Image (cartoon, rainbow, N blue to C red):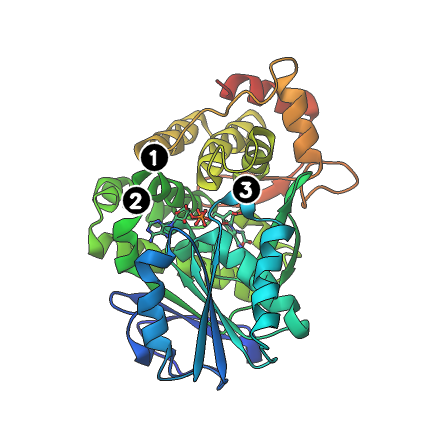
Amino acid sequence: MPEEDPSDVLIRLGDRSYNIVIGTGRLHAHSTFGQLPPAQTAVVVTNETVAPLYAQKLVTALQPHYPRVHVVTLPDGEAHKDWQTLNLIFDALLSHCCDRKTVLFALGGGVVGDMTGFAAASYMRGVPFVQVPTTLLAQVDSSVGGKTAINHPLGKNMIGAFYQPQLVVCDLDTLSTLPAREFSAGLAEVIKYGPIADMEFMAWLEENIEALRAGDHAALAHAVRRSCEIKAHVVGVDERESGLRAILNFGHTFGHAIEAGMGYGTWLHGEGVGAGMVMAVELSHRLGLVDGAFVLRLRLLIERAGLPVRGPVIDGQDNAGRYLAWMRGDKKSEAGEIRFVLIDGPGRAVMRSAPDALVREVIDACCA
Ligand code: NAD
Ligand code: GLY
């Protein structure tokens, strides 16, 4: 077990437990990285946008711990979350003769984090890795819990592995350079924790959404910490999504259809989740699980976060049919039946299927 620091959030997974460090000034403090397994080589994987902002700071913090620190810079964007880009990481690891003790550091958003985690899971059948998330979305969700993946043209995050990091370092200072659109996308994954698990947190978000969007440090620290606490609990109970963990996909079944249907990178992941949550709560309402007032309440919060509350038309001929086709390929589907994460009363999520006709009505009602 890692040493307990009361300011960290601990992911409890037996001998694979690890800490999420949340704070300011963490990325460039060499003490942040003092407890990691010893190795000759560290490899920082980042992208062309994040590298000029933060790579040198991280390299400087790592140098007291590793004789060799290399940087691999990937092209930026969801459209590059694929085999070709993943191979650039393997090319670098092999050309630097990295051994199986080499520690990988994922410096960037969820795209870099998911790809670096997958590379770490498969290079020499598994090397240690550390998540250093620099987007809000990655700090509150993707860096935590060990899901790693790349996309396939036929489906989002379809190729991947469960593989836990050794440490997650959320330096809130990095969020100051994040574009507003990306910040809003991250808020979608923050907001989801309310309706599925914690109505007190949802009420706090309603009070503090403007402060968050203005970059208020205390508000950000609370939002990141509470999100990580909820995710840590869920992952601790159900690491490999055989049950409870599926609730973290609230809004994602519709959202992934939007992302893939529009072409990766056109709609941001968080934007798809924002509009997707509106569709999922509307479906919950039409199934009699939640009242209309709650639908309006959640929709308003999503809108105030700067997120779209209507889905795009991905097919002018048969839009609902195209959404359904994408959603049938979702990882949660069973024998072609789509399994939705729905709201079963405020603060409670449930997995259910729904008649196609009703899903069609929701899509028709909720798309531009
Ligand atoms: P992203 O990684 O594409 O980052 C968004 C943009 O912000 C990119 O252009 C990036 O270069 C830039 N950026 C990153 N940090 C920055 C900073 N500090 N300052 C300025 N620019 C910065 O997108 P994301 O929203 O972080 O992550 C989305 C991805 O995460 C999707 O691929 C999604 O599938 C995945 N995801 C995974 C999980 C999981 O559990 N593994 C959970 C949720 C989402
Ligand atoms: N983001 C969903 C999960 O980690 O399970």
Please state if 17 lies on the left or on the right of 28 as rendered: right
Name the one closer to the observer, 173 or 85.
85
Whole-Å distance between the Cαs marked 3 and 2?
31 Å
Callout 1: helix, strand or loop? helix
Q: At x 64% / y 52%, what residue is drawn?
A: 83
Q: Is residue 315 above or below residue 79?
A: above
Query: In this view of the protein, can residue 56 be seen by the observer?
Result: yes
Name the one closer to the observer, 219 or 110.
110
Query: Residue at label 2?
Result: 205
Report the mark closest to the observer, 3 or 1.
Answer: 3
* Ligand 1 contact, mark 3 (Cβ < 8 Å): no
Query: Residue at label 1?
Result: 301
Query: Residue at label 3?
Result: 79
Callout 3: helix, strand or loop? helix
Name the one closer to the observer, 304 or 173.
173
Please state if 118 lies on the left or on the right of 19 as rendered: right
Upstream in the sequence, badge 3 or badge 1? 3
View extreme (top): residue? 317
